[in-house]
Amino acid sequence: MTARPAERGGDSDALVVPAGDPGAARPDPRLLPVAPVTRFAPAPTGRLHLGHLVNALYTWGIARAAGGRVLLRIEDHDRQRSRPEYEAALLDDLERLGLEPDEPPIDAFRSGATPYRQSDSRPVYAAALDGLRRDGLVYACDCSRATFAAWEAEHGRAWRGIGCPGGCRGRSLPDEDGTSLRVAVGAGTERWLDLLAGPVADEPAKGGDPLVRDRMGNWAYAFCVVVDDARHGVDLVIRGRDLLDATAVQLRLARLLGRETPPQLLHHPLVRHASGRKLSKAEGDTAVRTLLDDGATPAALFGRAARLAGLRPDDTPIDPHDLGSLFR
Ligand code: GLU
């Protein structure tokens, strides 16, 4: 069968929020922290798209409605996939959209190193790792994807449980360049009240102990965001439903790193193509830059994002400075 244009992803009107996504579109205002510190944390691995706009709408909207602050963080922990030209483009896109972070000013990224860029923060991650090491929680691991796949082939199910299939924690492998490192997160369940997804209980160790640094020397996503959210005082994490599954391990890591009060969490619905496919950073048709170049105003784009997120019944434009009105 030949795919219709909408199914090929060429038609951005065919975007939907899947009905199965949990939670109402708007959090109960009584549950929101007072004057929260939240963050917008894109990875510069592609262009900003409509999915990022939905996230920005929740992030700026809730911060403005609750008298809080928005930090901008560039999540370029993955050195192989991150590119400076994507960072430059996303900073320009934010400016064109009228999305000004409260901290740091956008120009701080253009003028050099900043603690809000992960690739400038490696000594901070190394220091956090040392703390976990002193607690005896870090071990070198030589399990590759193939090790996990071999375990799965032998047992008929994916690796699940404490540690890693190779039992590396007990092997005392040398911790050197080219070796990945894991953190022993322990057993048990993390529970939290997600401001949109509701009560959640999940096991941090369900996929084994998480990597903290991979064999290429990249700091792992979960580790960086936990260290960064703690050091920058982020107390409300607002992100897409796809990261709900990555949250239990982050709450556990935060605790192991000594954070007493974990941030509150809000996982919002994700925009997808009607076929179920996720939006991709490589797709021109949903790229914010293309839409702006084609003449869409920021207000029109936010109006459309609000309708897609289920926050508004139609596409009535919303001025970027008025996003707080969506959540009051
Ligand atoms: N950097 C992640 C992304 O681009 C977001 C991480 C987070 O919100 O924890 O999807």
Image (spheres, rainbow, N blue to C red):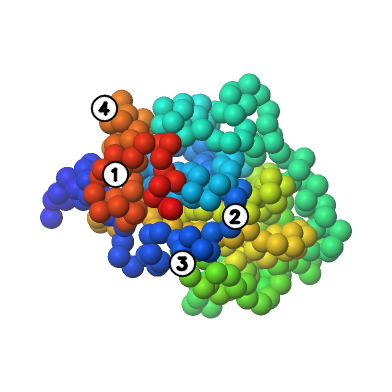
The residue that disc 3 covers is: 197
The residue that disc 1 covers is: 304
Classify mark 1: residues with Cα within 10 Å, few (<14), some (14-19) or many (20+): many
Q: Looking at the image, do the residues carrying marks 3 and 1 touch, with CB atoms under 8 Å apart?
A: no
The residue that disc 2 covers is: 34
Q: CA distance from mark 2 to mark 3?
A: 20 Å
In the rendered image, residue 53, in percent from the top left (x then y), is placed at: 40, 42
Q: Reading the chain from its start, which is encountered first: label 2 or label 3?
A: 2
Can residue 199 be seen in this snapshot?
Answer: yes
- Secondary structure category for the residue under label 1: helix
Q: Residue at x 63, y 58 (%)?
A: 263
Going by the numbered disc 1, the residue's amino acid type is Arg
Going by the numbered disc 4, the residue's amino acid type is Asp
Q: Reading the chain from its start, which is encountered first: label 3 or label 4?
A: 3
Q: Reading the chain from its start, which is encountered first: label 4 or label 1?
A: 4
- Name the foreground residue: 99 vs 175: 99
In the rendered image, residue 224, in percent from the top left (x then y), is placed at: 66, 49
Q: Reading the chain from its start, which is encountered first: label 4 or label 2?
A: 2
Q: Residue at x 63, y 21 (%)?
A: 111
The residue at label 1 has a CB less than 8 Å from ligand 1: no
